Amino acid sequence: MRPAATNPPPMPQELRQAALHWLTEADPSAKVAGVQHTWQAWLAQGPSCAPLDAAATLTPPTQRPLPGRPGRPRLVPPAAVPTRSPFTPEGHAALAHAIAHIEFNAINLALDAVWRYPGMPAEYYHDWWRVAAEEARHFELLRFHLQSLPRPGGGQWDYGDFEAHDGLWTMCERTADDIVARMALVPRTLEARGLDATPPIQARLRRVGTPQAMALSAILDVILRDEVGHVAIGNRWYGWLCQQRGLDPVAHYRHLVRLHRAPKPKPPLNTTARQQAGFTAQELAYLQQSL
Ligand SMILES: [Fe+2]
Ligand SMILES: [Fe+2]
């Protein structure tokens, strides 16, 4: 039998099957192009080109690993990823690579939210497809940036050239059986940490002040704007699910954080962005006191 990579299955048209298909795609360029093409086609033509079957229980294909990702970067424990200073050319490339890796994982996280959980309203699937397409754009912007940076000894950097860790996908696996935990701990915990982390990174980049540093800071402006929307989508569906199931959002969040050993936010909180993303005063007070 020929290897799966040289003989991919035909691309499914249904939106949740398409999400599973692109989740299992290992090649970053093919994943980005496939996600963006599917979402643009849906925006242009709607359900006539890509119907939605919210009720189906889907099964991942056995011949394609989940999630699909390239052989590089090599994945190592979080503590083994070296600290990155943007004040050297190589440190700058490592920082851009680390953020690109987060965005690559974020494409997978959004696609996983679409295919894995049946029985949600159509808007839920459309929201997460939009997130997947925006994450694909973020990854693409950072990869182009990396590819513009000269590498010692010749050539340019690319995605895969530095080691990376797998913390984001680990939380995806821990919450695979519980959509409430997924919404609580991936978008509104891990992605929300990105809202807090981005302005301090941009401040450091501005201190570096090179054209490359300013270009990366400008990319982070785009990402931060979009990420407020992603966290808002997480808050929207977490709130909706809590309401449906009669759960207190703050008390249940506290329970889920302990159950799944979710990381705490790192101060200072970006309260403006978090408020824009829909965190309530009560939720922000809980997060502040947990720091
Ligand atoms: Fe992103
Ligand atoms: Fe995101």
Image: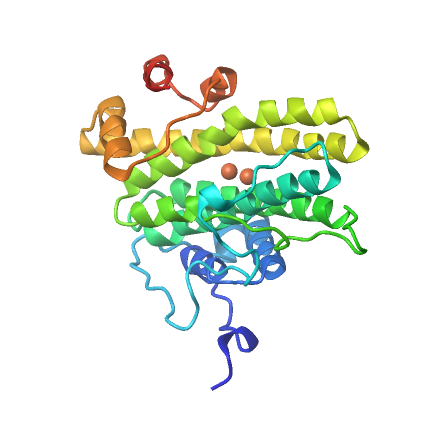
- Front residue of 108 and 158: 158
- Report the number of numbered marks: 0
Q: Quadrant of residue 95?
A: top right
- Protein image colouring: rainbow
Could you tell me which quadrant the C terminus lies in? Answer: top left
Q: Quadrant of residue 186?
A: top left
- Front residue of 205 and 69: 205
User: Looking at the image, which residue is at 35% across and 13% down?
Assistant: 285
User: Looking at the image, which residue is at 47% across and 57% down?
Assistant: 23
User: Looking at the image, which residue is at 51% across and 24% down?
Assistant: 196
On screen, 195 above or below 119? above
User: Looking at the image, which residue is at 25% across and 32% down?
Assistant: 258
Residue 80 in the image, given as x and y percentages of width and height:
49, 45
- Front residue of 73 and 83: 83
Residue 185 in the image, given as x and y percentages of width and height:
35, 36
On screen, 210 above or below 156? above
Residue 140 in the image, given as x and y percentages of width and height:
65, 48
Residue 31 as seen in the image, left or right of residue 189: right
Q: Is residue 126 visible?
A: no
Residue 90 as seen in the image, left or right of residue 59: right
Residue 238 as seen in the image, left or right of residue 87: left
Residue 58 in the image, given as x and y percentages of width and height:
33, 61
